Amino acid sequence: MFSKENRKDTISGVLFVALFACAATFLAQFHIFKSLGISPLIIGIVLGMIYANTLRNKLPEKWHKGIVFSTKTILRTGIVLYGFRLTFQSIQEVGINGILISFLIVSLTFIIGYIVGVKFLKLDKEITILTSAGSSICGAAAVLATEPVINAKPYKSAIAVSTVVLFGTIAMFLYPFLYKAGLINFDESTMGVYIGATIHEVAHVVAAGNAVGSVASTDAIVVKMIRVMMLAPFLIVLSIWLAKSAKNKTSNKKGSITIPWFAIIFIGVVGFNSFEFLSLSTIDTINTIDTFLLTMAMSALGMETSIDKFKNVGAKPVYLAFILFLWLIFGGFYLISFVVTF
């Protein structure tokens, strides 16, 4: 891809993607997007999809190598750097209950999503896995991290991201409304745990937690970060499970296990960050760079997504995401009620 004859075109493609990421970063500063908790990543994939369905044939095809590089290498780099947002000390702040709730939500949401998507809705297996991962862990970032593990096509990631963002945005407004209306009988701290354990995107958790109160905001973010921390072990388990289930039809041998290297490095980065070797300003800079890299990856995924591919899939991904949305609201409520009172 970066061979002597391809280097110039690949770099041109990467810079083209970076231009979209710059535009998405700029637009994300507008008040309307901030108030809705819409991150540059989401704007980036929308801009990429607009390009894919309008001007795709007007630009050099050779630049496509740079777009592919952004969906692969830059994506993995962004996931690794995501580890600088986390520390192992965060786990201590919510105790065993927070860890247990996070584990149950992540595992049960994914299992329910897979069974409903594949067995009942007869939905594409890869879209099911991506949508379930996004709903159970951390929205768009989880979809991005899962995509290379299952070798899914970019348009499938775009579909999963779209559904996760849709219901995550609804949850961001719904939870504070239900709490303030007295329809959720949690104290503010438990409400924060509920928000962090069951809302999709990190940005949506921050917005919903702040709308409830400062105590809820702190607990929501910590629990959400624990869910994010489960991304790496989830990817490793997913890789092992897929390998064991991928049997050769003729020899009946199990498929080979491919451990996602970026998930291992992600854990290492979290461990390094836990020692607080770097200053807060340095961490903020790394996180800013990471957000830009992930925005580039999302923009590139959008560039690989044609509306025609959405039409071929139909409404089933939305049905799956809606079912998981309901599970997170009601199932999450009763799980947290049980764990807190146990």
Image: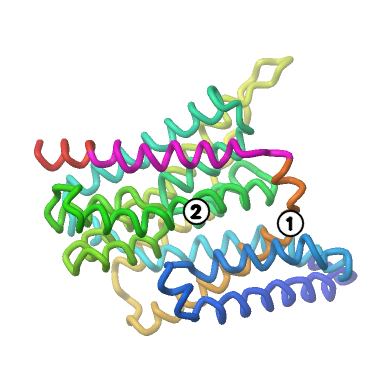
Viewer-side residue, 266 vs 17: 17
Residue situated furthest left in the rendering: 341
Residue 105 position within the rendered picture, expressed as x and y whole percent measured from the top left = 33, 41
Between discs 2 and 1, the one toward the N terminus: 2
Q: Residues within 10 Å of mark 2 (few under 14, many from 20)?
A: some
Q: Which residue is mark 2?
A: 166
> Residue at coordinates 70% horizontally, 72% vertically from top-left?
17
- Magenta range is 312-333
Residue 133 highlighted magenta (yes or no) = no
State left or right for residue 142 relative to residue 106. right
State left or right for residue 234 relative to residue 27. left
Above or below, 287 relative to 238:
below
Q: Which residue is mark 1?
A: 304
Judging from the image, what secondary structure is the residue with disc 2 in? helix
Residue situated furthest front in the rendering: 181
> Residue at coordinates 48% horizontally, 48% vertically from top-left?
134
Q: In which quadrant of the rendered view does residue 301 lie?
A: bottom right
Viewer-side residue, 4 vs 207: 207
Residue type marked 2: Leu
